[in-house]
Image (spheres, rainbow, N blue to C red):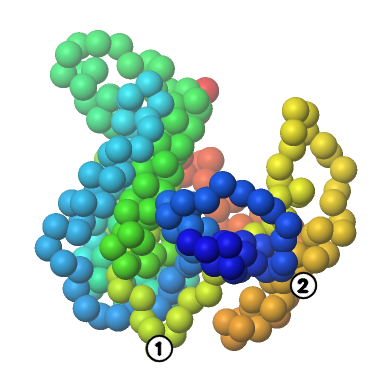
């Protein structure tokens, strides 16, 4: 990609002109071009696509090679409608031809231990749930990179954690398995195009040597302005970033039912010691 193309990609990613001079190749260009797609054409995915995405996902790193994740591929319209209800009616969950539900899965190791008459008390600790969540996230992001290389688009659906028990019932999840998030996959609808969403400036998130707790108010204000521009272009409420982010963490009432997650995890069999 030319220097002009690189500048365009950085401008889109940060929502403003930037003086960053970064190393560049097609992989980095593809990553910077990532956009969240919430509008899909009804066309099915080509044969072999799902399997390719899972192969890419399985190529992600896994802590101690425990591979504490699984994924459920949902294509049935009725099941997608039920998942959409859990996600408070997000229509793209119904529109997308494929919804992947990525799981933190400790049940497989528990079953292996029972089969081999081996102790698995380590599964009862919070650390192992964290391993499962991280493994699932890394696997899903590998799948995202793969699907975008095929011309597909996707959006993650964290709202499945609004009611993990309903999702578990729908998908037949055993104890010690948690739906971490959903993942809508399909062909982007060109009639409803998605833009690259700006991110915080690097000086806000990049710390060199030691964490700097100083609030970078100037760059955050500039980012708020960039987000308002993005929201206007996507016909979204023009609220910026700071206000929306602070509203999201205001209190338990702003967590869409996910303030109950600890109790749900305990009922689902997770030890959390």
Q: How many marks?
A: 2
Element class at badge 1: loop
Q: Position of residue 43 (x, y in %)?
A: 22, 78
Q: Quadrant of residue 64?
A: top left
What residue is rendered at 36% in x and 81% in y?
A: 189
| Residue labelled with disc 2 | 225
Residue 88 seen in the figure: yes
Residue 117 position (above or below residue 223) = above
What residue is rendered at 77% in x and 29% in y?
A: 210
Q: Position of residue 263 (x, y in %)?
A: 51, 41
Element class at badge 2: helix
Label number found at residue 202: none
Using a 10 Å C-alpha cutoff, classify the residue at mark 1 as few (fewer than 14 neighbours), some (14 to 19) or many (20 or more). Answer: few
The answer to whether residue 224 is left or right of residue 38 is right
Return the residue nearer the eye: 198 or 273.
Answer: 198
For the residues labelled 1 and 2, the Cα–Cα distance comes to 26 Å
| Residue labelled with disc 1 | 191
């Amino acid at each position: 990609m030319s220097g002009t193309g690189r500048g365009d990609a950085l401008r889109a990613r940060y929502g403003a002109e930037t003086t960053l001079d970064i190393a560049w190749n097609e992989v980095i260009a593809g990553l910077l071009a990532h956009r969240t797609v919430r509008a899909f054409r009804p066309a099915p995915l080509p044969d072999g696509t799902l399997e390719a995405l899972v192969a890419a996902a399985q190529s992600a790193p896994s802590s101690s090679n425990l591979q504490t994740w699984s994924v459920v591929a949902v294509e049935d319209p009725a099941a997608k409608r039920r998942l959409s209800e859990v996600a408070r009616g997000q229509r793209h969950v119904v529109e997308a031809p494929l919804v992947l539900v990525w799981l933190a899965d400790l049940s497989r190791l528990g079953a292996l231990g029972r089969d081999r008459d081996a102790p698995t008390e380590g599964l009862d600790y919070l650390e192992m749930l964290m391993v499962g969540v991280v493994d699932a996230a890394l696997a899903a992001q590998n799948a995202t990179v793969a699907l975008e290389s095929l011309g597909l688009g996707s959006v993650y659906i964290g709202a499945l954690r609004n009611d993990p028990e309903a999702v578990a019932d729908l998908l037949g999840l055993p104890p010690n398995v948690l739906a971490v998030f959903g993942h809508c996959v399909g062909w982007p609808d060109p009639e409803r195009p998605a833009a690259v969403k700006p991110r915080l400036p690097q000086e806000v998130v990049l710390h060199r040597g030691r964490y700097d707790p100083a609030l970078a108010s100037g760059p955050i204000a500039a980012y708020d302005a960039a987000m308002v521009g993005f929201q206007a272009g996507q016909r979204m409420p023009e609220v910026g970033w700071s206000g929306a982010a602070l509203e999201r963490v205001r209190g338990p009432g702003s967590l869409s039912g996910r303030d109950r997650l600890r109790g749900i995890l305990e009922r689902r069999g997770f030890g959390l010691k």
